[in-house]
Image (cartoon, grey):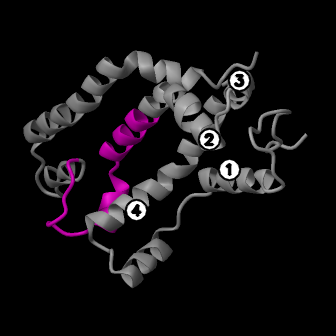
Amino acid sequence: MRFWRIAPNAERRPSAWNKLIYAAVLAGFMIPPAIVPTIWVLHLLGLFKTLSGMILIQVAYGLSFSILLYRSFIATIPRELDEAAIVDGAKPLQVFFKIILPLLKPVTITNVVIQSIGIFNDFTNPLYYLPGRDNVTVQLTLYNFMSQFQSQFNLLFMNILLITIPPFLVFLFFNKQIVAGMTAGAVKG
């Protein structure tokens, strides 16, 4: 049995492309990004050292995780809900927007929280793709308090404390939704 084999009846809309798309998503999740070719592409597009380019990079890096999270969550939604809506006369878009989409609230909150905390805590991507003093992110400010000859530990630790507060508050407020969204697709009945 191959590791990318899809469980029986896991697909809502069976297609010949599903296995190929699933393998591509897994490859995007497992293969690390190449920094230098990404910088070349950003230069060609005129997006190097811009927040627009950084946003595109963060979206591209988080896309595989988001797809896998949504896929596993949607697989737990009973198909009987779809069938009942179709019997009642709903069209496919109505089934999605009126039945499936409202059920995606826990996984959407989980995805937004996890991705935003990951982007907030990201140190290397802004270091590579937003060089210079004009685009310094909060995480890169940690770099400013350390040097070869002198370190300002009081400012460094205060900065670490300030950086830690927003993810902690997000976790406090969204703890139940994060747990519900992460465990919803974990167990099959």
Q: Which of marks 4 and 1 is nearer the N terminus?
A: 1
Q: Dot 1 corresponds to which residue? A: 26
Query: Mark 2 is on which residue type?
Result: Leu
Camera-near label (2 vs 3) is 3
Q: The residue tagged with tag 2: helix, strand or loop?
A: helix
Q: Name the residue under label 2.
A: 68
Give the mark, 1 or 3, whose residue is nearer the N terminus.
Answer: 1
Q: What residue is shown with label 4?
A: 56
Q: Is residue 63 magenta?
A: no
Amino acid on which disc 1 is placed: Leu
Q: Give the range drawn in magenta.
A: 111-138
* Residue 106 drawn above or below residue 35: above
Taking the spot 83% from the left edge, 33% from the top edge, the residue there is 9
- Circle count: 4
Closest to the observer, 78 or 87: 87
Q: Distance between the residues labelled 2 and 1?
A: 8 Å
- Report the residue at 24% width, 48% height from top: 139
Callout 4 secondary element: helix
Q: Does the magenta stretch include residue 118?
A: yes
- Quick check: marks 1 and 3 in contact, CB under 8 Å? no
Q: Distance between the residues labelled 2 and 3?
A: 26 Å
